Image (cartoon, rainbow, N blue to C red):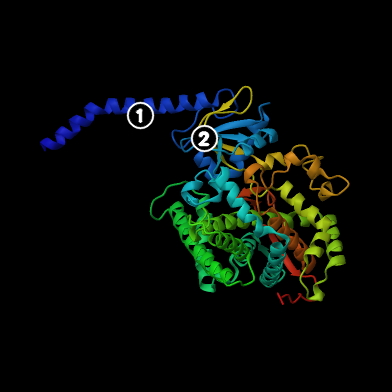
Amino acid sequence: MNSINLSTTTFTFLAPYLFTLVVFLLFFEQISYLKKRKNIPGPVLVFPFLGNAISLVRHPTKFWDHQSSLAKSSPAGFSANYIVGRFILFIRDSDLSHKIFSNVRPDAFHLVGHPFGKKLFGEHNLIYMMGQDHKDLRRRIVPNFTPKALSTYTSLQQITILHHLQKWDRLSSGKAIPLRFLARDMNLETSQTVFVGPYLAPEARERFNADYNFFNVGLMKLPFDFPGTAFRNARLGVDRLVKTLSVCVQQSRENMKEGKEPTCLIDFWMQETVKELTALSESGETAAAPPNTSDVEIGSYLFDFLFAAQDASTSSLLWAVTLLDSHPAVLAKVREEVESIWLPESDSLITGDQLAQMKYTHAVAREVLRYRAPAPMVPHIAAEDFQLNESYTIPKGTIVFPSVYESSFQGFSEPDRFDPDRFSEERQEDRVYKKNYLAFGAGAHQCVGQRYAINHLVLFIAMFATLLDFKRHRSDGCDEITYVPTVCPKDDCLVSLSRRCARYPTLSLH
């Protein structure tokens, strides 16, 4: 009884001090935020610690639209907010975005890919590399995207796309079906087949798909890393994915040592790596293997490729269907061009030369990427205070969001209009307004696989438009943007499908 009375007395004595401490910390947090915000647009007061995180997670589209409106309201071209104890800056102005992209270095900005990316992606990650180490790795990646390699991938892409389009046709049978998860599954299979090919067995693919789904869900959750939370499931899922990919790297390495022909991306990568390591051995050098060449390291970089190819590509495919449906004249021109170059009845794969001839379809793909940039923002963190313009210095620790999406609607003629002809030889707006076309980023971390991504989108548009008739089932707000985590139509692209061609082609690698 005496101990209870003592505890009560102690708490009563300490309560005013604890209350004062809490009030002081809350006051200090608000003052710190306001000091960083200065006179740029942003909330006047923020909720303690969480800031506007709940709004961001529950209504991301509304949150970023508001940040954009705030940035437009000021000549500065940027706005501020506060998320889970972090001051953030949203940049709308294209020139300022380029300033961020071109200053990724230890004493300026670090690319983070996601506000809580390091916890999710792990340490061995292409996103966080910079300097000579990053240059050396990109040099090793280049052989993965030569014309020969891209031609190999193009064949694999078409076979996978055809398989899934036939599946979609059967599922639809004239009724409306949402395409988002179907397109995601198609892209996941395409990425698995192109990146690691025969090294991922059917059972491993099922586990792989489940773990990637954990990762996808965790991307949109707060970083509460406790057992059972979506974020913890995502982090553990990434660990398992990297281990699986590392085994694929090991198997490919052995095949390339035996002189076998490459059949997928990791083979092309390992072919060059084996050559490099063999040359070092023959020269008599006894130093350790070059950095970034171990199975685990390359497995983690393959996961980066998977992440980059998967969700962004799904977004682009959905918007391509949406925009082709709402622009029948564009769809008609795509069909006319494709059918003058390739016919399903030929039972032949679209060759690299044929793909290059589809200039209008390429223009449509580029306009889809401009009009609905799949990764609308590319988060960076300020490693040091950085002078952004004459009147504002970004404080150290700020998470900066250069908006690729906002840049896409600056400079171009009638930017709010979906107009593939802007990329024609006559107008060449992709060159005239090059600084505003940031779908693949800019600077040292510009997407190394952009030719692969463009090819995939062009092949999908060509095959989807030629093989299928489709009708979008429209409802109020169906074309509104939603973040999942890339941008997609709000209704998940609800369409009905039916076969358009006389028969589906029979495609094979032989």
Residue on which the image places disc 2 = 383
Q: Is residue 296 left or right of residue 11?
A: right
Q: Quadrant of the C terminus?
A: bottom right
Position of 188 compared to 11: left or right? Answer: right
**Percent x, y for residue 262?**
64, 68
Say which mark, if any, is on residue 52.
none
- Residue 195 is drawn in which quadrant? bottom right
- Residue 279 lies in quadrant: bottom right
Q: Is residue 450 above or below residue 99?
A: below
Nearer the viewer's eye, disc 1 or disc 2?
2
Q: Earlier in the sequence, mark 1 or mark 2?
A: 1
Q: What is the x, y in percent for residue 433?
A: 78, 40
Label 1 CA crowd tier, 10 Å (few <14, some 14–19, many 20+): few
**Residue identified by numbered label 1:** 22
Residue nearest the viewer, comparing 355 with 374 = 355
| Residue 492 visible in this rendered orientation of the protein | no
- Label 1 sits on what residue type? Val
Q: Secondary structure at mark 1?
A: helix
* Neighbours of disc 2 within 10 Å: few (<14), some (14-19), many (20+): some
Q: Residue furthest front?
A: 284
Vertical placement of residue 131 versus 190, above or below? above
Secondary element at tag 2: loop
Q: CA distance from mark 1 to mark 2?
A: 29 Å
